[in-house]
Image (cartoon, rainbow, N blue to C red):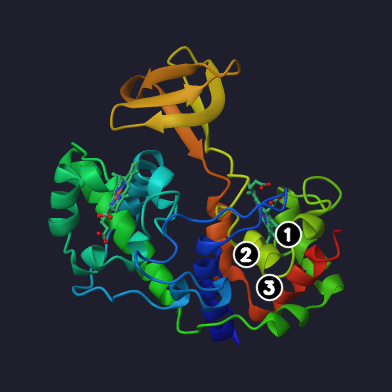
Amino acid sequence: MKQTVWTLSAALIGVGMVVAQGPGGQVAGRANGPAKGQVARSPIQSPASLPGPPTVTPQTYPAEQIKAGELRFTSQCGFCHGRDAAGGETGPDLTRSKLVAEDTRGDKIGTLLRQGRPDQGMPSFNLSDADLGAIVAFIHDQKSKFEALGGGRRAVDPSDLATGNAAAGRRYFNGAGGCSKCHSATGDLAGIATRFQGLALLQRMLNPTNGRPAPPRPKVTVTLASGQTVTGPLATEDEFTIVVLDSSGARQTYEKSAVKFKIDDPMSVHFDQLGKYTDGDMHNVFAYLDTLK
Ligand code: HEC
Ligand code: HEC
């Protein structure tokens, strides 16, 4: 049972990369969908649902380093490669990249980042060893997560979508799933089944970082030496500074060494959730959301 969820979710994440239905009915395509020279296919048979090249030298990284890398990746790379590294507006899916598969602890990625491929739209970066190490750790970790999700299943059968129980889904939404901590059926999710249908709705539910509207920025709380706290969306951050958008939208820069700060990314919940859903829960929640017309 569990296995089906993994592979189905993976296929959906893949499919989600290629197409997502926006609210106005417009389709937000991904620049990196089919590789150059390939014929665009319907999302159901997307090549993105096939597994990428396997990692040549398996490697593991400390959780701390992965976490640090996630923040760096989000602020410096996520804009192009997607916050989950699985492909974004202009950058390819790094979890399926041959270069990443052949990388050992940054030997290939590091060289690429220093040089960039400016003609191809990949900028060069001058990163500290610590930042590079953290970013590499995050990319490899994402790759193994996506590999663990399977990807062997090539097509999502639309009849899979119709097996859930909406009442059970509602209980899960308000209970064990914890969805109601952030969402409300009569608030933000009212009409979700009108805005997204079928597969597009399932994709949106599993991985809202794909498609439009774009998800919110992580939120930062900075505690100054005086004890005063400042809260706002994260604009960017690097090794030494953190830049927060204040209530007027202006960028406020803080030295990391001089303040305490906490970054809270609401979207990380959705990624963690993929590992928690059982097959049944997922279909039930989908059936429930599908009633919110
Ligand atoms: C402005 C957009 C942009 C940003 C920012 C960006 N990239 Fe890229 N990246 C690209 C594009 C476009 C390519 C594909 C270049 C090509 O076709 O050769 C690429 C390629 C890559 C590749 C090689 C993939 C392959 O299989 O050849 C890696 C690895 C990579 N980027 C990592 C990163 C990392 C790590 C960061 C952040 C430190 C980053 N990129 C930031 C646009 C970007
Ligand atoms: C910690 C907060 C949090 C939790 C818990 C959470 N989500 Fe989300 N969810 C978000 C954020 C943030 C977004 C992106 C903003 C948005 O689109 O509303 C989002 C987006 C969505 C969307 C797309 C909404 C839209 O309007 O496009 C759906 C559907 C969704 N979540 C379903 C769920 C379900 C089902 C659960 C429980 C299994 C869940 N979420 C748990 C924070 C959360």
Q: Residue 52, image x and y in percent? A: 34, 74
Can residue 231 be seen here? The reply is yes
Where's the N terminus, which quadrant?
A: bottom right
Horizontal relation, residue 56 to residue 40: left or right: left
- How many dots with numbers? 3
Which residue appears at 29% of the width and 45% of the height? 121
The answer to whether 173 is drawn above or below residue 257 in the figure is below
Horizontal relation, residue 100 to residue 23: left or right: left
Horizontal relation, residue 78 to residue 1: left or right: left
As drawn, the residue found furthest toward the bottom would be 1
Mark 3, residues whose alpha carbon is within 10 Å: few (<14), some, or many (≥20)? many
User: Which of marks 1 and 2 precedes in the sequence?
Assistant: 1
Disc 2 residue type (three-letter):
Gln
Which residue appears at 81% of the width and 67% of the height? 288
Which residue appears at 56% of the width and 49% of the height? 267
Whether pointer 1 and pointer 3 mark residues with C-beta atoms closer than 8 Å, the reply is no
Query: Residue at label 3?
Result: 282
Indicate the quadrant where residue 286 lies.
bottom right
Q: Is mark 1 within 8 Å of ligand 2?
A: yes
Disc 3 residue type (three-letter):
Met
Q: Secondary structure at mark 1?
A: loop
Instruction: Please state which of the two labelled residues, at mark 2 or mark 1, is closer to the viewer.
Output: 1
User: Which of marks 2 and 3 precedes in the sequence?
Assistant: 2
Q: CA distance from mark 2 to mark 1?
A: 9 Å
Disc 1 residue type (three-letter):
Phe
Picture disc at residue 203: 2
Query: Residue at label 1?
Result: 196
Indicate the quadrant where residue 248 lies.
top right
As drawn, the residue found furthest toward the top would be 226
